[in-house]
C-alpha cells in the first residue's frame, strides 16, 4: 500500500496519474499548501524539502520517497511497467522525464508565478518564461514526429510532461501550430487513468488555485 501526500498541482498529478495507470492501491493524504501543512515537522520527516508530492511505501518498511520524478521512477521500477527494462530504453524515458523536471516544469512554473500570481506585472520576465516554455513545447512537438508517444511506447515520460503541458493556457503559452503536441495532449486526456489522476486529491478550480498561490507567495 502506498500513502500519497499530495495537492492539486501538476507535480502532484504526475504521481496520482501514474498510480492510477499502474493500478496500485494507494491512500491519499491531501496537503494544504495555503495552510503550510507541507512545512510541519510531521511532513518534513517524510519530505525534508517541504514540497509535494511524497509517498510512503508501507509494504517496504515505510520507505519514504520525495521529488515527483524520483517517485515515478521508484513506482515504475517496482511495478515493471511504463519504464523499459533494457538500459537504452530506460535511458531514453529517463531523459525525457528529466527534460520535464529540469525544463518544462521550472519554466512553466515561473511563467505561472509572473503571469498569474505575482502582484507586479514585469513584462520582460513574463515574456522570458513564456518564450522558453514555448521553445520546450516545440522540442516536444518535434520529438512526436512519426510517433504517438515521446519514446514510442507510452511511459512515465509522457505522464510527467503531459501533467504540465496540459495547463499551457494557465501559463499563457500558445500552442498554435504545434499540431503533434496538441494531438498528444488530447491522446493522454482521453485515457481513463489520466482523467482519474488529475482529480486527486480534488478537482482543481483555477480561481481557487490563484487565491492559494497568492497566499503562498505573500507569506
Image (cartoon, helix red, strand yellow):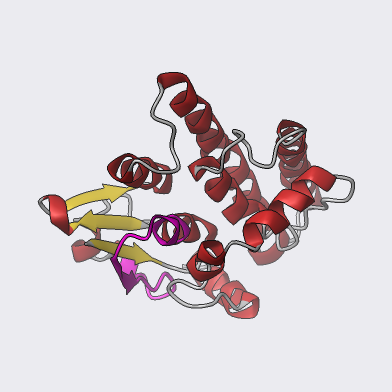
Q: Is residue 52 visible?
A: no
Q: Which quarter of the rendered picture does the N terminus lie within? A: bottom left
Is residue 170 shown above or below 35?
A: above
| Residue at the top extreme of this rendering | 88
Q: Position of residue 171 (x, y in %)?
A: 71, 57
Q: Position of residue 65 (x, y in %)?
A: 27, 48
User: Was residue 18 drawn as part of the magenta stretch in this picture?
Assistant: yes
| Residue at the right extreme of this rendering | 177
Is residue 120 shown above or below 30?
A: above
Foreground residue among 91 and 11: 91
Q: Is residue 210 left or right of residue 98?
A: right
* Number of numbered discs on residues: 0
Q: Is residue 189 left or right of residue 156?
A: right
- Quarter of the image for residue 106 reads top right
Is residue 74 shown above or below 62?
A: above
Foreground residue among 58 and 64: 58
User: Was residue 63 drawn as part of the magenta stretch in this picture?
Assistant: no
Seen at 57% across and 70% down, the residue is 214
Seen at 54% across and 58% down, the residue is 10
Foreground residue among 158 and 126: 158
- Quarter of the image for residue 144 reads top right
| Residue at the left extreme of this rendering | 61
Seen at 38% across and 56% down, the residue is 51
Seen at 39% across and 55% down, the residue is 22
Q: Position of residue 217 (x, y in %)?
A: 53, 64
Q: Is residue 8 visible?
A: yes
**Residues shaded magenta:** 17-38
Amino acid at each position: 500500500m502506498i500513502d500519497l501526500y499530495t495537492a492539486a498541482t501538476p507535480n502532484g498529478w504526475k504521481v496520482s496519474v501514474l498510480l492510477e495507470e499502474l493500478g496500485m492501491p494507494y491512500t491519499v493524504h491531501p496537503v494544504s499548501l495555503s495552510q503550510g501543512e507541507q512545512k510541519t515537522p510531521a511532513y518534513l520527516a517524510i519530505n525534508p524539502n517541504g514540497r509535494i508530492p511524497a509517498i510512503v511505501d508501507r509494504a517496504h518498511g515505510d520507505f519514504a520517497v520525495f521529488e515527483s520524478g524520483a517517485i515515478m521512477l521508484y513506482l515504475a521500477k517496482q511495478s515493471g511497467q511504463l519504464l523499459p527494462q533494457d538500459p537504452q530504453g530506460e535511458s531514453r524515458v529517463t531523459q525525457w522525464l528529466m527534460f520535464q523536471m529540469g525544463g518544462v516544469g521550472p519554466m512553466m512554473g515561473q511563467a505561472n508565478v509572473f503571469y498569474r500570481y505575482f502582484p507586479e506585472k514585469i513584462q520582460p520576465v513574463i515574456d522570458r518564461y513564456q518564450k522558453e516554455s514555448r521553445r520546450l513545447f516545440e522540442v516536444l512537438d518535434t520529438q512526436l514526429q512519426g510517433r504517438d508517444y515521446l519514446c514510442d511506447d507510452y511511459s512515465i515520460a509522457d505522464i510527467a510532461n503531459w501533467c504540465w503541458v496540459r495547463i499551457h493556457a494557465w501559463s499563457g503559452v500558445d500552442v498554435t501550430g504545434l499540431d503533434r503536441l496538441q494531438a498528444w495532449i488530447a491522446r493522454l486526456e482521453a485515457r481513463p487513468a489520466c482523467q482519474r489522476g488529475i482529480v486527486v486529491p480534488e478537482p482543481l478550480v483555477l480561481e481557487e488555485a490563484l487565491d492559494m498561490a497568492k497566499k503562498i507567495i505573500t507569506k
